[in-house]
Image: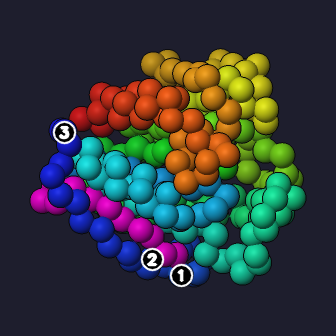
Amino acid sequence: MGQQTGIVEREVQLRASDGAALPVYIAEPAGAPSAPRMVIAPEIFGVSPWVKSVAQRLAREGFRAAAPEIFARDTEPIGEDMQGWMARIRRLDIPQAVRDLRLALDSLQGGPAGSIGFCLGGALSILTAAEGGLAACVDCYGRPRWMVETPAPHAIDAARRIRCPVLGIYGKRDSGIPVEAAEELRAALPQGSELVFYDAGHAFLNDTRPDRYDANAATLAWPKIIGFLRRNLA
């Protein structure tokens, strides 16, 4: 497995377990139908251009990547501040979102499978891996505990059911997720897992958010992520 010269992009619509239409963006390395498969759990912004760029990045590295729009059922405006974002999370059926992620992953068929998620999606990536059947899980600055009422388990509790290695990516200067909270998550992860801290704040991988992006930390973190996936999904 290595970098690919060409990728193929497509958008499909699946039928979710609750009967809703589920749009899914897919990026794949050209001519590699049995390549390892990944599902991407998005940030609060859903399948944004940045999430699509993550799928493309994974495809260039030899992975088939699917990004389901877990907010497809939500017709309310997202808002432009933390209050609006938290309201969107409160409206999200988190157990259904996990089922959506599994459906998108299963739609790729064949090959070893993994999950990756960012912010909200970091916790969702852990919940998805806790359902079993994955060979790798990446959690990028996901909260160990939900800040809203939900029937879903906290990520830190779901982590204890995971049987595959987990890579946690966190920022030392993340004001919303203190290092101590992330370290508590580390203790719940299965053997072979790793938690890495970078000198950055929250959401530092997203280069479309200049207020959050940290180029130095992202330059270090992406090779770590890709290397982890290659070792566990090869």
Looking at this view, is 6 or 31 the one in front? 6
N-terminal of the pair, mark 2 or mark 3, is 3
Query: CB of mark 3 within 8 Å of CB of mark 1?
Result: no
Amino acid type of disc 2? Leu
Q: Is residue 162 within the magenta segment?
A: no
Q: Residue furthest left?
A: 31
The quadrant of the rendering that contains the N terminus is: top left
Q: In the rendered structure, which amino acid carries the disc numbered 3?
A: Gly
* Label 3 element class: loop
- Discs 2, 1 touching: Cβ within 8 Å: yes
- Which of the two residues, 88 or 198, is positioned nearer the viewer here? 198
First-in-chain label (2 vs 1)? 2
What residue is disc 2 on? 14
The dominant secondary structure in magenta is strand
Q: Position of residue 75 (x, y in %)?
A: 72, 81
State how far apart marks 3 and 1 are (Cα): 34 Å
Question: Magenta includes 31?
Answer: yes
Q: Which residue is under mark 1?
A: 21
Check disc 2 and report its element: helix, strand or loop.
strand
**Viewer-nearest of discs 3 and 1:** 3
Which of the marked residues, 3 or 1, is nearer the chain's N terminus?
3
Q: Going by the image, does 21 lie left or right of 219? A: right
Coordinates of residue 123 in the picture (x, y in percent)? 64, 43
- Can residue 118 be seen? no
Tell me where the magenta segment starts and ends, as one range: 22-33
Q: Nearer the viewer, mark 2 or mark 3?
A: 3
Q: Residue at x 55, y 68 (%)?
A: 69
The residue that appears at 49% across and 45% down in the rendered structure is: 116
Q: Quadrant of residue 28?
A: bottom left
Numbered label attached to residue 175: none
Circle 2 Cα neighbour tier, 10 Å, few/some/many (<14 / 14–19 / ≥20) = some
